[in-house]
Image (cartoon, coloured by chain):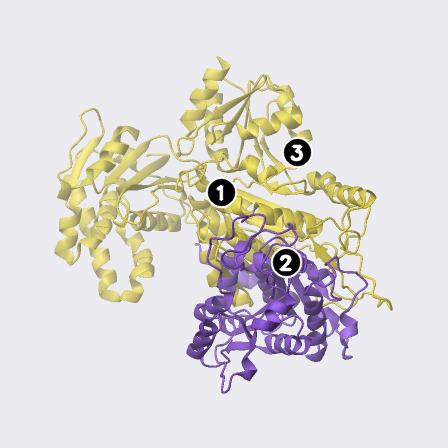
Chain colours: A purple, B yellow
């Protein structure tokens, strides 16, 4: 069924032109996913990209792979269903900060707890772009938008601190201009056996005039520059996030011991469920019926 | 001898009322009697009046009985709330512990029996239920030994002593009652049953078994009354076939996870009740738009909002047919019995895959939770049809053009390739899209894709076998009664009584509520003098659907009940007579 030939990142390019604004951070995320997919040895038909709604949600249509662009905030439950159906697929869920941390936050938390082996890439631009500039849970306090003309009076959400405390087994952050670093983190996320959350600062050049490329360059700290940083140390991960106001990039926390959900499910098939024969035997059915007599 | 018997046990929730009914009915089931049980309960764990009414007969029974022969009471409330159902030669057996008072205006016989005291003497007051079962046996002249097998099954793992003690409790209840009984109780004794083994199950068991037989591998669900038994059954059974149940964070996750799993190539579904279905509406639209199969079970309960979560109602009909924004092809199937619940669930999965549409399997609380005798299920009738599913054999293409997953075809159904298949790459989106799934806003494409999806509807009205159950022998009936889901049993009994009064009555039960089987129903309406649609809601939703599709706005009348309780035959008899005369 599958081709055994190795693919290059070009094989993951399709002939659709993204409708993102010139300069949008999402272009680099698209490129990083394509590179990471090739680097980990995938072929396009073995990858399924499941995305939400918003500018960044369109990404599933811009990668030559199986892709599903679903409904706002629900990329994660759809992606988990796909992975449960066919464990041989590599499943990437993706979307924006509104998708994952506002409307879909309930799913984000429970996907982290559940730990099904998928990779979730959030393109975080701290604003609602597709609806033309309203506040996001990632917007800073005081941030002025069309929906907060006097400045946001709500606390900024910290998805990284939340992930570390919620039991996520892979928590990472990156910056879209740093293609090499981002590609490596996505590869690590795909290779991680369990749920991976990768938050990518992906600036919106049209509606966010505060959190710009220059702003991030000035404020971000690479974890690789912190001497002795150990992503296995959960306590240190929390401390570092708090010290740096979350503005760090790299693998923040990784738990390599905890088995993935599919490894823990009682009786879960060794072969992909999508290949299973659906009919029960007459005998098996007879046994089921007898229990009600 | 009695042709049939109605027995009710009542008390405070959490007192073991349910298990008393369960033990009583399991034993009678094994003797070959037909049973129909209905539980009255509240949305709380401890306290509040609960009762379990069980109808026993040597013939098939499909409705809650009008009256009552035996009332077993563990508190005064049980007597006060239920005694009016007893007929004159009925009997009340009450626990002496609460000093029961006999209502003044009843002719029923009244006995107080020390249920709790006898049980306590044997070791624990918990066995008062067994004493009550024994007392019942004395009244209906049933040999207590029939309970041995059931008691062994329930208490066997607690050891031989526990089994013996419980059997002793039954025996003591029997002995005590026998001594007290004055006059004959032969009118409360049933003729012997045929000893035939039959299934005894709730509708939710039948639906869950149907899902298993249909090849489901993943159920994604959030607990809710009265649907949870479906997930509880499947979490025990799915691991045996490599699958599982995921308890999701909410119903939105349940529906979308099921969509993801169906897209991934397996059969997956969810089950809920009104509040959950309200949350799933956007996902149902996604299934319709992306043509990903989806089966959702809706076990209707009292609405709106949290409504009456543990009570019978049929008020989700319109929401199930029309819920979700925009226009999609959709199927709504309404089984009326547990047997239909089994076969229709299998068919729901077949239709969902063959037509690549969402299918709602509509149930109601009375069907989902009522425990009844079920005729043998024929597994050879189970057929798995997956439609235009493509798992291999796609010609490779040199360019990066996408597979035409949404190819415009004559029947509106396109080949459905699942992820992982070589050469099948395409896009899927809830945005309007072209034949390869790429977003497109072109008016011509919009019309072509919309027409393609809508073409499926025309065929869907012909796809379901026996879309209307008919018991319609009369060419010119005085009355046509129409219903859906669980009301069929009460309608059939009402028919018999109306016919005994000289009326010619036909019955049509709608099994496929959407797309509506207009051609099946029109001749029946035309030929009847009076038409009444019987339904558990306040606005006559099914009547509206019929009028919309078939016409006859003046002729079609409604018999409605929305107080939370199921129809009993007498309600329908009385309302029918009011309509006719």
Depth check, front residue: B469 or B516: B516
Which of pointers 3 and 1 indicates the residue nearer the eye?
1
The quadrant the N terminus of chain B occupies is top left
Dividing the picture into quarters, in which one does residue B48 lie?
Answer: top left
As drawn, the label of residue B262 is 2
Of all chains, the one bearing label 2 is B
Q: Which of marks 2 and 1 is nearer the N terminus?
A: 2
Distance between the alpha carbons at the discs numbered 3 and 2? 28 Å
Name the residue carrying label 1. B274
Asked whether residue B257 appears in the rendered view, the answer is no
Chain ID for label 3? B
Of residue B460 and residue B170, the one placed in the foreground of this image is B460
Residue shown at 49% from the left, 22% from the top: B499
Is disc 1 on the same chain as disc 2?
yes
Disc on the earlier residue, 3 or 1? 1
Q: Give the CA distance from mark 2 to mark 1.
A: 23 Å
* Residue designated by label 3: B517
Q: Position of residue B488 (x, y in %)?
A: 50, 34
Residue B152 position, x and y percent, is 31, 61
- B27 horizontally vs B101: left or right: right
Badge 2 crowding class, 10 Å Cα cut-off, few under 14, some 14 to 19, many 20 or more, is: many
Task: Check disc 2 and report its element: helix, strand or loop.
Answer: helix
Q: Can residue B279 be seen in this view?
A: yes
Q: Is residue A220 above or below residue B438?
A: below
């Amino acid at each position: 069924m599958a081709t055994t030939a190795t693919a290059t990142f070009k094989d993951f390019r399709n002939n659709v032109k993204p409708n993102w604004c010139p300069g949008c951070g999402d272009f680099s995320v698209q490129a990083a996913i394509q590179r990471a997919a090739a680097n980990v040895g995938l072929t396009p038909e073995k990858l399924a990209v499941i995305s939400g709604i918003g500018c960044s949600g369109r990404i599933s249509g811009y990668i030559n792979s199986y892709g599903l662009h679903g409904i706002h905030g629900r990329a994660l439950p759809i992606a988990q269903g796909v992975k449960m159906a066919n464990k041989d697929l590599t499943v990437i869920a993706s979307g924006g900060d509104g998708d994952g941390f506002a409307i879909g936050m309930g799913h984000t938390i429970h996907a982290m707890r559940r730990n099904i082996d998928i990779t979730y890439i959030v393109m975080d631009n701290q604003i609602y772009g597709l609806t033309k500039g309203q506040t996001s849970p990632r917007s800073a306090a005081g941030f002025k938008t069309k929906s907060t003309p006097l400045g946001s009076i709500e606390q900024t959400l910290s998805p990284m601190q939340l992930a570390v405390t919620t039991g996520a087994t892979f928590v990472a952050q990156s910056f879209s201009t740093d293609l090499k670093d981002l590609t490596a983190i996505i590869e690590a996320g795909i290779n991680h056996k369990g749920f991976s959350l990768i938050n990518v600062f992906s600036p919106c050049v049209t509606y966010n005039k505060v959190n710009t490329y220059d702003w991030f360059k000035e404020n971000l700290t690479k974890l690789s520059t912190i001497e002795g940083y150990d992503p296995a140390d959960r306590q240190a991960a929390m401390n570092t996030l708090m010290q740096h106001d979350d503005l760090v990039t790299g693998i923040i926390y990784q738990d390599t011991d905890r088995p993935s959900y599919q490894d823990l499910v009682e009786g879960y098939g060794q072969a992909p469920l999508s290949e299973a024969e659906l009919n029960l035997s007459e005998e098996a059915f007879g046994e089921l019926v007898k229990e009600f007599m | 001898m009695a042709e049939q018997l109605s027995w009710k046990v009542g008390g405070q929730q959490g007192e073991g009322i349910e298990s008393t009914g369960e033990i009583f009915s399991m034993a009678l089931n094994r003797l070959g009697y037909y049973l129909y049980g209905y539980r009255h309960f509240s949305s709380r764990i401890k306290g509040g009046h609960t009762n379990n009414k069980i109808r026993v007969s040597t013939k098939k029974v499909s409705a809650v009985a009008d009256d009552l022969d035996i009332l077993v009471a563990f508190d005064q409330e049980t007597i006060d709330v239920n005694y009016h159902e007893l007929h004159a030669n009925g009997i009340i057996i009450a626990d002496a512990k609460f000093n029961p008072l006999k209502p003044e205006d009843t002719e029923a016989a009244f006995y107080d029996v020390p249920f709790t005291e006898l049980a306590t003497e044997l070791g624990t007051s918990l066995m008062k239920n067994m004493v009550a079962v024994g007392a019942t046996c004395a009244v209906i002249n049933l040999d207590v030994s029939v309970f041995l097998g059931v008691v062994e099954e329930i208490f066997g793992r607690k050891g031989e002593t526990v089994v013996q003690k419980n059997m002793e409790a039954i025996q003591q209840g029997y002995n005590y009652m026998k001594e007290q009984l004055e006059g004959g109780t032969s009118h409360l004794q049933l003729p012997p049953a045929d000893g035939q083994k039959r299934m005894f199950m709730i509708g939710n068991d039948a639906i869950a078994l149907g899902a298993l037989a249909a090849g489901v591998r993943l159920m994604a669900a959030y607990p809710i009354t009265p649907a949870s038994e479906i997930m509880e059954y499947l979490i025990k059974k799915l691991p045996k076939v490599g699958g599982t149940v995921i308890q999701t964070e909410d119903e939105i996750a349940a529906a979308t996870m099921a969509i993801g799993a169906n897209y991934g190539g397996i059969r997956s579904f969810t089950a809920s009740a009104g509040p959950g279905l309200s949350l799933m509406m956007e996902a149902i639209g996604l299934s319709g738009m992306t043509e990903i199969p989806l089966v959702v079970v809706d076990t209707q309960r009292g609405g709106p909002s949290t409504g009456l979560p543990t009570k019978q109602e049929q008020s989700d009909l319109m929401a199930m047919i029309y819920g979700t924004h925009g226009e999609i092809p959709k199927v709504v199937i309404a089984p009326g019995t547990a047997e239909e619940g089994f076969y229709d669930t299998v068919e729901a999965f077949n239709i969902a895959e063959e037509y690549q549409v969402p299918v709602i399997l509509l149930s109601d609380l009375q069907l989902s939770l009522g425990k009844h005798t079920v005729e043998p299920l024929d597994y050879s009738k189970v057929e798995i049809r997956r439609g235009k599913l493509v798992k291999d054999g796609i010609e490779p293409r040199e360019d990066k053009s996408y597979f035409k997953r949404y190819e415009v075809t004559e029947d509106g159904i396109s080949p459905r390739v699942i992820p992982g298949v070589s050469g099948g790459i395409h896009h899927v989106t809830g945005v309007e899209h072209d034949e390869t799934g790429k977003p497109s806003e072109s008016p011509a494409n919009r019309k072509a894709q919309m027409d393609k999806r809508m073409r499926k509807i025309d065929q869907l009205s012909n796809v379901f076998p026996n879309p209307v159950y008919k018991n319609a022998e009369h060419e010119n009936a005085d009355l046509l009664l129409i219903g859906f889901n669980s009301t069929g049993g009460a309608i059939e009994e009402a028919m018999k009584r109306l016919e005994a009064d000289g009326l010619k009555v036909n019955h049509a039960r709608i099994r496929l509520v959407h797309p509506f089987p207009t051609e099946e129903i029109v001749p029946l309406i035309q030929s009847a003098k009076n038409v009444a649609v019987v339904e558990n809601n306040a606005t006559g939703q099914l009547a509206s659907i019929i009028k919309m599709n078939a016409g006859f706005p003046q002729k079609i009348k409604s018999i409605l009940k929305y107080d939370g309780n199921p129809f009993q035959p007498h309600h329908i008899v009385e309302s029918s007579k009011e309509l006719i005369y």
